[in-house]
Amino acid sequence: MAEPLRPEEEDIALAAELALGLLEGEDLAAARRRQLADPAFAAAVERWVLDFAPLALGGLDAPVSAGLWQRIEARLPGEDHGTVVALRRWRATAIATSAAAAVLLAILLLRPVPQPVVMPPPPVVVAQITGTGSAAFAARYDADAGMLHVRTEAMPSSRRAPELWVIPAGGKPVSLGLVAAQGNRDVAVTPAHRALLAEGATLAVTMEDAATAPHAGPSGPPVAAGKITIL
């Protein structure tokens, strides 16, 4: 046997039926009186009216034959209160589900399609560091990660290690640390030094004592140098 509708379910069903105009006679009059006297019920009816409103967009009226629900109930076994309650529960659920689906469909159809936002590629900081001899380095800076990727392409033979410097325009050399004597090395740039990697600054490599690096200043002339370019 079906469970009876809970009071809140009765209210939901009644509010939906009133908003849809399904009530007649004394049921309609009673619901109207309650709508005037009960602010919570009136608000529930108003919510249903707003939810059902999109159904009218572009829709066509289709008359329903009189006494439809009565004919459905007449086909049910007589005096079966549980079945009638189940029918009312089904009707309330069907109303709510159909309305929610229709409102969602209307929102999806009427909502403007957002245009994709195309972000410009981030600028790339690069430098080709070359010397008068055989020294050659290439550098690419990843600003998001604060990482300078340095590739040693060639370097003169030395017992010392290559140390990388950034020299701002009109400024003094600042050590960024040691780079590889051969191959690739990623150099983490501290936040205080990241602003120095700007257009027009110079990257240079000198040969220094690895044990005491990084140094406050270079001990000799650079073996390679190159201007930073932002692409």
Image (cartoon, grey):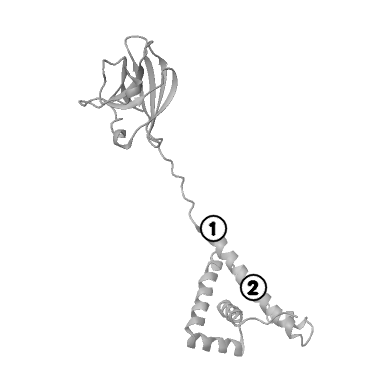
Screen quadrant of the C terminus: top left
Q: Nearer the viewer, residue 75 or 223?
A: 223
> Which residue is most to the right?
77
Q: Which mark is residue 220?
A: none
Q: CA distance from mark 1 to mark 2?
A: 22 Å
Q: Position of residue 155 (x, y in %)?
A: 39, 13
Q: Nearer the viewer, residue 157 or 211?
A: 211
Q: Nearer the viewer, residue 114 or 199?
A: 199
Residue mark closest to the camera, 1 vs 2: 2
Drawn side of residue 214 relative to residue 41, left or right: left
Q: Which residue is mark 2?
A: 93
Q: Amino acid at mark 2?
A: Thr
First of labels 1, 2 by sequence position: 2
Q: Amino acid at mark 1?
A: Leu
Q: Badge 1, how many Cα within 10 Å: few under 14, some, many 20+?
A: few
Q: Element at badge 2?
A: helix
Q: Badge 2, how many Cα within 10 Å: few under 14, some, many 20+?
A: some
Residue at 62% across / 68% down in the picture? 98
Q: Nearer the viewer, residue 66 or 222?
A: 222
Q: Is residue 70 above or below residue 158?
A: below
> Which residue is most to the front?
211
Screen quadrant of the N terminus: bottom right
Q: Which residue is mark 1?
A: 108
Q: Is residue 15 visible?
A: yes
